[in-house]
Image (cartoon, rainbow, N blue to C red):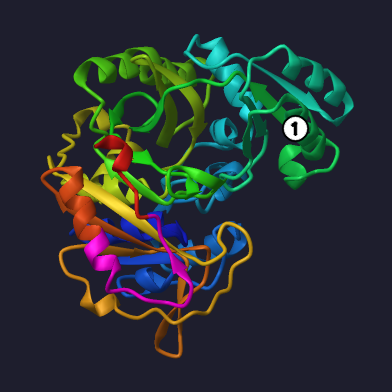
Amino acid sequence: MNILLLGSGGREHAFAWKMVQSPLCDTLFVAPGNAGTAAIAKNLDFSATDFDAIKALVIKENIELVVVGPEDPLVKGIFDFFKNDADLKDIPVIGPSKLGATLEGSKEFAKEFLMKHKIPTAAYDSFTAETVEKGCEFLATLQPPYVLKADGLAAGKGVLIIQDLAEAQEELRNMLVGQKFGAASSKVVIEEFLDGIELSCFVLTDGKSYKILPTAKDYKRIGEGDTGLNTGGMGAVSPVPYVDAVLMEKIETRIVKPTIEGFQKDGIEYKGFVFIGLINVKNEPIVIEYNVRMGDPETEVVVPRMKSDLVELFLAVANEKLDEFELEIDERSATTIVVVSGGYPEDFEKGKVISGLETIEDSIVFHAGTKLDNGNVVSNGGRVLTVTSYGDNFEEAIKKSYQNIDKLHFDKMYFRKDIGNDLK
C-alpha cells in the first residue's frame, strides 16, 4: 500500500525507517520530511497542516493509510477532516479526533478529564488575564516550587518551575497579560509541584483495546545536570531501569485503563498514540500531562525496540483489531542522544553543513532538523540529529551513541554529555 506520514522531525524519521521495512509498504510519502526521510521515502513540499494539499495527494497517489507524527494537525482536526469528507472517509488516519487531541491542545481540558475519571494527578487551578490577581493569591497558598503551564500548545516550552513566590507571580502576569507564549498562554494552569522521577508511558489504542509500548525517559533541559531552559528533548533511554513490574501494574490499572475507558465514556474517538507523562512519587505514579502523539526523542528509542511490523500494527489500530495483535519487543536497551544547533532553544543559525554521517557504525542516525542543499545535508532546525544505539544495558548503548557523535561535525553543534547519568 501507499502510505502518507505527516511531520518533519526525528520522530517521523524513526517511523519512516520502521515502516519502509514492512513488506506491506509500497511507497512512503512524507510531508514535509527531512534529509533523512528523503533517503528512504518521497518527501513532499507542503506542511503537515495543509489539509487541502494532503487531500489532493491522497487522491492522486491512492494513499491507503495516513500516519500523523506531530500534534498540530491532530489539534487542528485532521482525523475529523478525513472522516467528514466523502472522498477520504474510508482512509484510516492514525491519530485521535479533534476532541481527543484537546487532551494535548488544552492543559485545562486534560486536568478536567483526569479529575473526572479519578486518575491520579496534581491539584490545580486555571486563570486568565481577567483573573490574574486571583492566580497570584492562589500561588501564595502553595508551597514552592511553583508550576505554571501555558494552557495551549507551546512546542514543549510552555512550562515554568519557579522557586520564588514573587518571581512566580511576576511570570504569571507575563504569561497572561504580557502574552509571553502568545495565544498559548491566554489561560494558565497552576498546579502543585510533585517531587519525584519523571518517565513516559506510551500507549497505542484503537479506542477499545490498547497496547502499552516500552517505557522511556527523556531529558528536557538544555544544560548538563538538568539545568537551563526546557527544550523539545535532549536524549532518551528505554526501558527505564527503575520501572519494575509492581510500578507498571499500578500505571496500567490506575492510569492506562481508566484513560481508555474515559475515552469510551466521554464519546472520544481515539485511534492512535497516548503519551502519558508521569512522575513516580515514592513508587506512586501520578499523571503530569497527556500528549496525543509519540514523544520526540522517545520515539527514537521506542520504535527501534519494536520487533513487530509497524504497518501491520497501524492496520490493527485502524480495523479495531489491536487485541488480536502480538506486540514483540526487543529485550535490549536503546538510547538516543540529540545533537542540536548552538544557541538552541533560543536563537540559532541554520544551514550548517553536516559531515561524518557516512562514518557512523553500530548506531542509527535519525534526522530531525535537516534538509538537502546542493547535495549536502545541512542543519535546518534547533534539534538537528539524534544518534540511537542498542546495548545489553543502557550504559553500553549510551557509550556507542557518544562514540559515534564524535565522528559528526557541524559548526556550533552541541549535545549533552550526561544523558543517563542519573540512572547509574
The quadrant in which the N terminus is found is bottom left
Q: Is residue 394 magenta?
A: no
Q: Is residue 67 left or right of residue 358?
A: right
- The residue to which callout 1 is attached is 167
Q: Is residue 354 left or right of residue 387?
A: right
The structure residue drawn at horizontal position 53% and vertical position 73%, both measured from the top left corner, is 45
Q: Is residue 42 above or below residue 308?
A: below
Of the pair 117 and 249, the residue shown nearer to us: 249
What is the magenta range? 402-416
Q: Which type of secondary structure does the marked residue at label 1 adopt?
A: helix
Quarter occupied by residue 201: top left
Q: Is residue 135 left or right of residue 109?
A: right
* Residue 322 drawn at (x, y percent): 27, 32
* Residue 30 drawn at (x, y percent): 42, 65
* Residue 183 drawn at (x, y percent): 76, 43
The quadrant in which the C terminus is found is top left
The structure residue drawn at horizontal position 18% and vertical position 59%, both measured from the top left corner, is 23
